[in-house]
Amino acid sequence: MRVLIVFLSVLLLMVVVSERKIKSFENENPLLAEWKGDFGGVPPFDRIKVEHFKPALEKAMADALQEIETIANLSEKPTFENTIAALERVDKKFDRVVTIYYVWSSTMNSPEFAKVEAEMNPRLAAFSDKIYQNEALFKRIEAIYNSPEKEKLNDEQRRLVWLYYTNFVRAGAKLSKEQKEELSQINQRLAKAFTQFSQNLLADENEKFLVLKSEEELAGLPQSLRDAAAQAAEKKGIKNAWVILNTRSSIEPFLTYSSRRDLREKAWRMFVSRGDNGDKNDNNSIISEILALRAKRAKLLGYKTHAHWRLENSMAKTPEKAMELMEAVWKPAVKRVQQEVSEMQAIADKEGQKIKIEPWDYRYYAEKVRKAKYDLDENEIKPYLQLEKLREGMFWVAEQLFGFEFKPVNVPVYHPDVRVWEVRDKRTGKHVGLWYFDPYAREGKRSGAWMNAYRNQDKLDGETTTIVSNNSNFIKGKPGEPVIISWDDARTLFHEFGHALHGLCSKVTYPSLSGTNVPRDYVEFPSQLLEHWLLTPEVLQRFAVHYKTGQPIPKDLVEKIKRASTFNQGFATVEYLAGALVDMKIHLAASETERIDPKAFEKQTLEALGMPKEIVMRHRLPHFAHIFSSDGYSAGYYSYLWSDVITADAYEAFMEAGGLYDKKVVERLVKYIFSVGNTIDPADGYRLFRGRDPKVEALMRKRGFVE
């Protein structure tokens, strides 16, 4: 008896020690802790180190799987509350860890973190498969989906049941045990390939750059670009030189202004060859592998191609429907390019330049055409486009449309460049969410501009407010001086803020349906629409002010911008649409047995399309991160064009009503678009807003393709 008592005492002590170790582990690893502080808690960015990620992900996955097993094996009859709502709660816990992991991946990537990614991304894919392939769990979801009791649920709940059921089926829930194992192996191999593709691209962007060593090599560059290049050289540790980084925000201005044709060609070749240099960072064989794996997965899941699988739950529904739209726009866009090239060639000939316009000449001579045709010089506009003033302008638009006010707050951030604002409803004073802003380029941060949701809004267990971020890659100038950006960059700034506002406006119950969690070919609509407010006099007169004099942008200059609104649309459309068409065609052509040569496919497809030789795809395949760093936009890059049809049509709704600040149209926009997330079918939501389906003619008018 005494021995038994001693044994039980020791066992109890071991349990207590074990619990203490678990609690200590969770306290020591900030990724696993509940988010603390004001605003419903915030990410503990200041406490996170690379070594925290692997153990935190392992613990978060194990805990989530345990909770899911509990739900799957409940003895009670499956109901919405004990199954669907319960799964929403599991996701919220896991999301805290994985969200910060992906923030690090895109903004703070380092050689040490890259090793973690290489190991953990396949394991995350396997984790996802364990959930989707849980037979007992799927039977509960299927029972709810097929139950007559479903009709007693409200509209949002029925939408969520449909989403869970279709997501599980599309992820292989109905496959045999052997097929599920095969699918999981494919997904893990894809995750590894996606990670390698992204790391190769990031390496090319970090390791390759153009060094300018003399005043002669700076010829044509405005002072703001010279200052940015000087700062980039300083950060690289290169003295008495200037550096043009291998990122879009650095290369495109250089191609626009540099009068050194030899250096333009050098910069252009460096940029378009990212991931395609036949070295350790080459992505071509990885692309071939990804395409074959996607084709194999699609066949396993019962779909004709990866494209058919991806588009099933989109607005387009089928690749054929998406191709129909793209092909309708392609020919008039190419025709416009021919006109644009002719105008550029005429200027080059007049200047006595014995050249034929090449891709590295396009932006340079397009700028000359803009000056000649519209008396509009980009350098005239830029002094009025201060990054900080435009940010204030975005805040003002958010106040006018949605009643939001922004107040800077001090919360933990992952880098000193990041700043944070609290968003409140000005009418009620109610806290709406937080907005993080990470505007500057740096090593370890992927190029481009994007929006993240660190936390989705929901009302599942009381009010959970959202946390969103906008990320850009502007180049810092001299310390203390304002950052001056281009007109295109200003539009991108408003575009990404549109995504953030989509998240901030959300008023739904369940996180999976919240904010920007909508079909891929609809998510760009709210963001593209917000770009239009940049050009309103209300914004320009207040916030487009000269960085030296403080004077607002002259009205005659604004009129020039408006008159030139369709300028270079041939180039912009063809550059984008070539990528969208190649994306769709390569996924329709991909086979699990015959490897595609990306270089040959890209070349042959563009030749068959009649691609103007003066233009290259906006994203060539070896650096097309949209479609090869994840499944995200794969067979879905057309989405920007699809959304822009809706955008152009919605803009005309405002114009028909009297302007972009019309209160009644704004009210419908908020009610049926910005606040509803994925609680209703997007096509139904748009009809409620507009009274009908969108018309493609509005897009043709917007781009100036109507004679």
Image (spheres, rainbow, N blue to C red):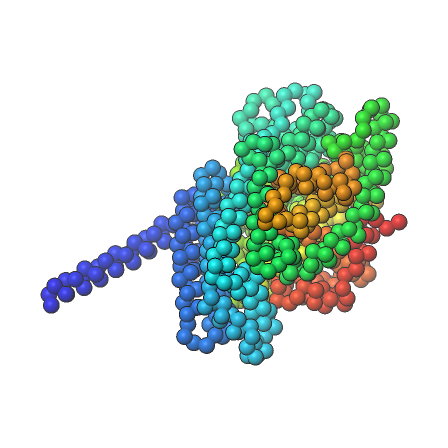
Q: Nearer the viewer, residue 119 or 555?
A: 119
- Residue 11 horizontal/vertical position (percent): 21, 61
Q: Look at 70% across and 62% down and name the residue there.
A: 669
Residue 327 in view, yes or no: yes
- Which quarter of the rendered picture does the N terminus lie within? bottom left
Up the image or down, 560 lies above or below 300; here it is above
**Residue at the extreme right:** 707
Q: Residue at x 57, y 35 (%)?
A: 282
Q: Is residue 667 visible?
A: no
Residue drawn at the location 58% of the way across and 65% of the way down: 166
Q: Residue at x 75, y 51 (%)?
A: 326
Rendered location of residue 420, percent (x, y): 54, 49
Quarter of image, res 381: top right
The mark total stands at 0
Is 212 or 384 nearer to us in this picture? 212
**Residue 275 placement (x, y as % from top left):** 60, 36
Residue farthest left in this picture: 2
141 and 231: which is toward the camera: 141
Describe residue 537's horizontal placement relative to residue 227 as left or right.
right
**Quarter where residue 614 is shown:** top right
Considering every residue shown, the one lying at the far front of the view is 593
Q: Position of residue 355 (x, y in %)?
A: 81, 26
